[in-house]
Each structure stands twice: as C-alpha cells, then as structure tokens.
Image (tube, rainbow, N blue to C red):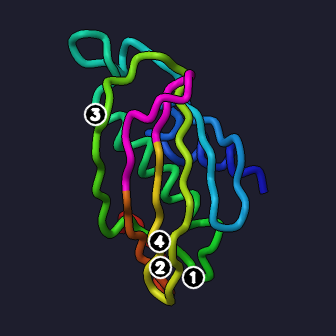
Amino acid sequence: MDLQNVLENSDRVFKFLEVKILEIKPGYSKIQIPYKEEFCRRGNVLNGGIIMTAIDFAGGLATLSVNDGIDQVTQELKINFLEPMYKGPFIVEGKVVRKGRTAVVVQIEFRDSEGKLGAIALGTWYIIRDRIVKKE
C-alpha cells in the first residue's frame, strides 16, 4: 500500500500541508512539510496550529505503524513550542514510547531545516478495535 498516495487522496488537511512521508517503520515516523507563506502568522513565522497539525500527523503515523486494531484517534496531545520556525522544509519525527492494548504514547519532535528544535510534544492515541470513525 502506498500510504503517501492514500492520504493525499483521502485527507484534505494532509494534502493542504503538502506532507511528505520520509520514513515509517515499527514505532517510528518521519515526515516533512514545506515553509509556505500561507502557513505563517505575522512576522512570517510558522503558525502554531500548523506545527501542531504536523505533529499530530507524525504521531498518528508512528501509532499506525504499531496499531493492531482497526482505527485510531488522537486522545491527548501536549506541545511545548520552543523556538519560532521559519527555515523550512521542516522535519517532524514521531517515536512510540509505549504501546498498550488501547493506548499508544508517542514523543514527537519538530525541527527546522538546520536541525533546530522548534517544538516537542507528547501524545496519546487511542486504538479502536470495534468500529471505524467516520461521518454517518
């Protein structure tokens, strides 16, 4: 399965952010997003919501790599914004810290093109075993 194409064709936010999946292996994901003026707040630095969304994708993909259920949702996501980000493209890495039966805890780092750490996050994804989440 070509996950890049599946997400580009089924997830409008993924496509809007121009996310590129660089690597996925069990318990790990690495993605890239570009610097675009449309993603910036005043001062031409990346908007925190864009950073948070990219972090959510990286954590979700790391979770997907170990998900033995049928779906998943972000249950909790805590982010510390450390530096203003303006040197793209940006790299976002998610690493599974712990996988339980129903919850996966992931640490995510958001870095600029020079490797400067702009944000760090800790999130929990809930593994769904009995239904797919979708609009009825």
For marks 2 and 4, the one nearer the N-term is: 4
Residue drawn 47% across the image and 29% down it? 116
Q: Residue furthest left?
A: 42
Q: Which residue is mark 1?
A: 69
* Residue 55 % position (x, y): 43, 47
Residue drawn 50% across the image and 86% down it? 100
Cα distance in 3D space between marks 2 and 1: 6 Å
Circle 2/circle 1 CB separation < 8 Å = yes
Q: Which residue is mark 2?
A: 127
Q: Residues within 10 Å of mark 3 (few under 14, many from 20)?
A: some
Q: Which residues are magenta?
A: 110-121
For marks 1 and 3, the one nearer the N-term is: 3
> Which secondary structure lies at badge 3?
helix
**112 w.r.t. 124: above or below:** above
Circle 1/circle 3 CB separation < 8 Å = no
Front position among marks 1 and 3: 3
Cα distance in 3D space between marks 2 and 4: 5 Å
Identified by mark 3, the residue type is Gly
Cα distance in 3D space between marks 2 and 3: 26 Å
In magenta segment, residue 13? no
Identified by mark 4, the residue type is Gln
> Which secondary structure lies at badge 1?
loop
